[in-house]
Amino acid sequence: MDRDQHHLQIDDLCKAVASLQTPHKTQQQSPCIGYLTDSSKRRYGIYPLESAITPEKPRWTVYSLRQILTEQTGNRRRLGLPDKLRVAIDLAYSVLHLYNTPWMDGQWSDNDVYFVHHHDVHTTSLYEHPFVYRRISAPKADRADNTDDRPAPYSVIRNETLFTLGILLIELLFGKSMEDLQLPCDLDCTGTPGVTWCTARRLLEKGELEFEVGPGYADIVRRCFWCEFHDGKSSLDDQELQRAVYEKVVVPLEGILHGLSMRFT
């Protein structure tokens, strides 16, 4: 969160967004238009998708996680293990905060996770503060409010949102997209949810994740992949499942990151 004194708390988000149509000098200096606070007093910076900076001298660039994983950014610095864990923690928190909102449903992917990079700041800032961005379409009367209530094509995916989180945790760990992690054997996926599911299951069953970072991370991915949390519940509308996701995904990820930082201090 930028601490610039011009970044004020936003009381009316609609008015703040409308003001972007007439950029002010302060907006030209920094794209952050202010911040929102939640019930825990945490601040969330609000950034427009397109900066008011002139195209001749762009200062801010937005990269998707997909672009980073497939090396389409031109950035020379790869995701290090601490970067991967921080992003994983932010995504896990995002699931708990944004589940069943227009910003996140069961169909989210690495194309919906973005990073803002300031060209005047050292490249270490590229992987900080990821955010989920979705283009929000007009609501439809016949659209279900809960994506997990939709009939699933394969019951083995008990919660699409958590399943996708598991897939993104795999991609982050290896620093590659699921397509790049595929082997020819994964293409024989008849009767399964698809190639991505087969690739992820192979990596989990063969112990590839344990080899990279240890059993703790692999256990976290398995819980998301199979939705193995609390009393067989699968809807994140259930508060007990939300608490279980926090305790069995967020907290262990933070523990792995803390343990890693202690090794190098």
Image (spheres, rainbow, N blue to C red):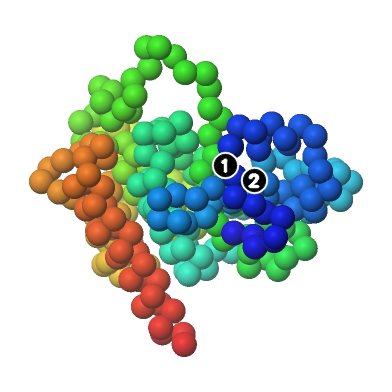
> Where is residue 72 shown, x and y percent of the image?
65, 49
Query: Is label 2 in a helix, a strand or a loop?
Result: loop
Query: Residue at horizontal 31%, vertical 43%?
Result: 162
Place of residue 6 in the rendered image (x, y in percent of width and height, measured from the top left): 72, 55
Using the numbered discs, state the Cα–Cα distance from disc 1 to disc 2 in whole angstroms. Answer: 15 Å
Q: Is residue 262 visible?
A: yes
Q: Secondary structure at mark 1?
A: loop
Q: Quadrant of residue 143?
A: top left
Q: Amino acid at mark 2?
A: Tyr
- Vertical relation: 264 (above or below) 155: below
At label 2, counting other C-alpha atoms closer than 10 Å, the crowd grade (few under 14, some 14-19, many 20 or more) is some
Query: Given the current orientation, which residue lies at the most extreme front position?
Result: 11
Residue occupied by mark 1: 11
Q: Position of residue 209 (x, y in %)?
A: 33, 62
Seen from the viewer's position, the closer of residues 183 and 209 is 209
Which residue is under mark 2?
47
Residue 163 drawn at (x, y percent): 31, 42
Query: Which image quarter is the N terminus in?
Result: bottom right
> Viewed as shown, does residue 71 lie left or right of 144?
right
